Image (cartoon, rainbow, N blue to C red):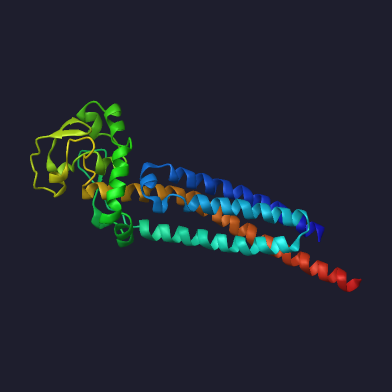
Amino acid sequence: MGVSNNITAVLNMVALLCSIPIIAAGIWLAQKPDNGCVHLFRWPVVILGFLILVFSLIGFVGAYRYKETLLAFYLCCMAILIILLLVLLIFAFVVTRPDGSYGVPGKGYREYRLDGYSSWLLNHVVDSKSWRKIRACLGDSDVCPKLTQRFITADQFFAAHLSPLQSGCCKPPTICGYTFVNPTLWTNPSNPTGDPDCYLWSNDQTQLCYNCNACKAGLLGNLRKEWRKASIILIVAVVLLICVYVVACSAFRNAQTEDLFNRYKR
């Protein structure tokens, strides 16, 4: 049984290492301004990563100490965690698949509309009840103030590749025809009826376009972009975890068979 347990111990160390990029991806997501304001998406990946880390340690101890009960507990819990991680990945892919962005002629940034995103995101993230808290959180962040430090002239700003959140919340929609003063100060709209958001824009630095549908769409665009990036790491990690789990199950079964055979011989 020793060889099989040694194999299982090594595999558990691999699983433990796989938990590190999962935790790192979760922390990266959690510290983003949009995820910091949308608490629904903030910690699930981090929590799953830490649980995988804990149960990998349990599995390693069980294999190293020849504790079959611990190994069985580890395999059961790890199966549940892998399934939860797969469900989270599939769910995130489905709800972030639609893209509400569109190009703006002559501009380096894209703009965003709500009707391009999934109904689940619209109903659970930017509904009127949730948005009051999110709007206040965004207003307290440095997402928009940073732009005034980065861009001085209109040409610099219009050529910039803004994040969806910056594009939607920190400036009025291009169709409104506002004149650039600085990235968060705009005057004299030439087409104020071009979009309902044109009337919602405010040069008050605590208001800007935080009440605009463009800001809600920009938030969803940011969430989509970040979750798509994190999903690449998570997919690689979950594939490795599944491979490790399958081999660990095989080693555990072989260990049990070997143990029964040795008992029968005695």
Q: Can residue 164 be seen in this snapshot?
A: no
Q: Nearer the viewer, residue 65 or 241?
A: 65
Instruction: Answer with left or right where residue 257 lies relative to residue 18.
Output: right
Residue at x 54% of width, y 46% of height: 21
Q: Is residue 20 above or below residue 158?
A: below
Q: If the image is split into quadrants, where does the C terminus sit? A: bottom right
| Residue 2, image x, y percentages | 81, 58
- Residue farthest toward the bottom in the current orientation of the protein: 264
Instruction: Answer with left or right where residue 204 lies relative to residue 219.
Output: left
| Residue 8, image x, y percentages | 72, 57
| Residue 196, image x, y percentages | 14, 50
Residue at x 56% of width, y 60% of height: 81
Residue at x 87% of width, y 68% of height: 262
Res 108 → quadrant: top left
Q: Is residue 167 above or below residue 41?
A: above
Q: Is residue 36 above or below residue 248?
A: above
Q: Nearer the viewer, residue 127 or 241?
A: 127
Residue at x 87% of width, y 70% of height: 263
Q: Nearer the viewer, residue 93 or 104?
A: 93
Res 167 → quadrant: top left
Instruction: Answer with left or right where residue 54 lies relative to residue 208.
Output: right
Q: Is residue 152 above or below residue 162?
A: above
Instruction: Answer with left or right where residue 155 lies relative to residue 33.
Output: left
| Residue 182, image x, y percentages | 20, 29
